[in-house]
Amino acid sequence: MSKLNSVALLPMGTVSDEAVRYLFRNEDVEFVYCKMISDVFQSTAKGVTDWSVIPIENTIDGSVSLHMDWLVHEVDLPIRAEWVYPSIQNLIGSATELAGDNGEWDPGKITKVMSHPVAMAQCLQFIRATLPHAELETLSSTSEGVRMVKNNPGKGWAALGTKIAASEMELDVLKSGVTDHDNNFTRFLLIGNMPYEKPDAPLRKTSILITLPEDYPGALHQVLSAFAWRRINLSKIESRPTKKKLGNYYFYIDIEYALDTVLLPAAIAEIEAIGCQVRLLGSYPSLPFEGK
Ligand SMILES: O=C(O)C(=O)Cc1ccccc1
């Protein structure tokens, strides 16, 4: 019997867990749950798992900088696939503990709300309007917040997390769908040395990092023009610190073409010819969300 492929991800009941179950809905894969995102990256970097799943960007909060930086600076694992998954957060706690005089949960009884920083950012308007007095604490994942609530009864704590986490920890969904915007998706990356092929994916993307040789007028313009005149569409460009010197940046670029598309190698060669360093992060299928 052949060995199952394995994938490292944040704990059971997280948004990542929901997203991974969705990606592998027709495949048999072993899930290896890790407490912190650094453990997720290291699991695959050390060869314990074949792939890691990384939430990388969110409709509301933008790129998850910590995860981008790990991808670029701490590991050298190619991107194998990307997909988007809706993140729906719920306010979770003990309805009995938080009940007011009318028997309903009473917002005034909530002293602290815990969650992952991305989930917190997604629900900030709800928190400001409904729980302005509550202390906020960010944790390594949404399900860690739910676990903290479960393990600390009587303190008036609540968490923002998934319905799966609420039911696993036998807590109540006090209010469902508390995310501020309906159209709230998170983009996930599958990374690792093990190939992951989806030949019928409707779109392939390529991600690269570009470091400019020095800061001179028009440097970035030159880079972008190599794509522009070839009519190569970019879906993202973001600058991040190189961590070597204050004010030095690299550019992270997502391109809506596979690396073997005729014009792309020529564009990259042109960028290298003007003295830029180009690092390939991966060329991979971009998988659409087809509904649950
Ligand atoms: O903590 C989780 O549930 C995660 O998977 C990280 C995360 C949190 C919020 C939105 C997307 C991903």
Image: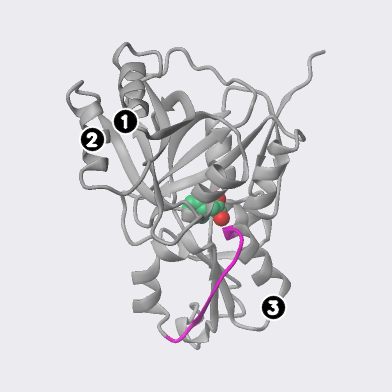
Residue found at x 17% / y 24%? 229
Q: Could you tell me residue 61's position as x and y percent? A: 38, 57
Q: CA distance from mark 1 to mark 2?
A: 8 Å
Neighbour class for label 3 at 10 Å: few (<14), some, many (≥20)? few
Residue 75 shows in the view: yes
**Residue 140 lies in the magenta-colored region:** yes
Q: Could you tell me residue 204's position as x and y percent? A: 39, 22
Identify the mark nearer the N-term, 1 or 2. 2
Helix or strand or loop: what does disc 3 sit on? Answer: loop
Q: Which residue is mark 1?
A: 274
Q: Which residue is mark 2?
A: 222
- Which of the two marks, 3 or 2, is nearer to us in this view? 2
The dot on residue 153 is: 3
Helix or strand or loop: what does disc 1 sit on? Answer: loop
Neighbour class for label 2 at 10 Å: few (<14), some, many (≥20)? some
142 vs 82, nearest the viewer: 82
Helix or strand or loop: what does disc 2 sit on? Answer: helix
Identify the mark nearer the N-term, 3 or 2. 3
- Which of the two marks, 3 or 1, is nearer to us in this view? 1
Q: CA distance from mark 3 to mark 2?
A: 59 Å
Q: Which residues are magenta?
A: 133-142
Q: Quadrant of the N terminus?
A: top right
279 vs 120, nearest the viewer: 279
The amino acid beneath tag 1 is Ile
The amino acid beneath tag 2 is Gln
Identify the mark nearer the N-term, 3 or 1. 3
Looking at the image, residue 10 lies above or below residue 47:
below
Q: Could you tell me residue 280's position as x and y percent? A: 47, 29
Q: Are marks 1 and 2 in contact (CB under 8 Å)?
A: yes
Horizontal side of 131 relative to 156 (left or right) equals left
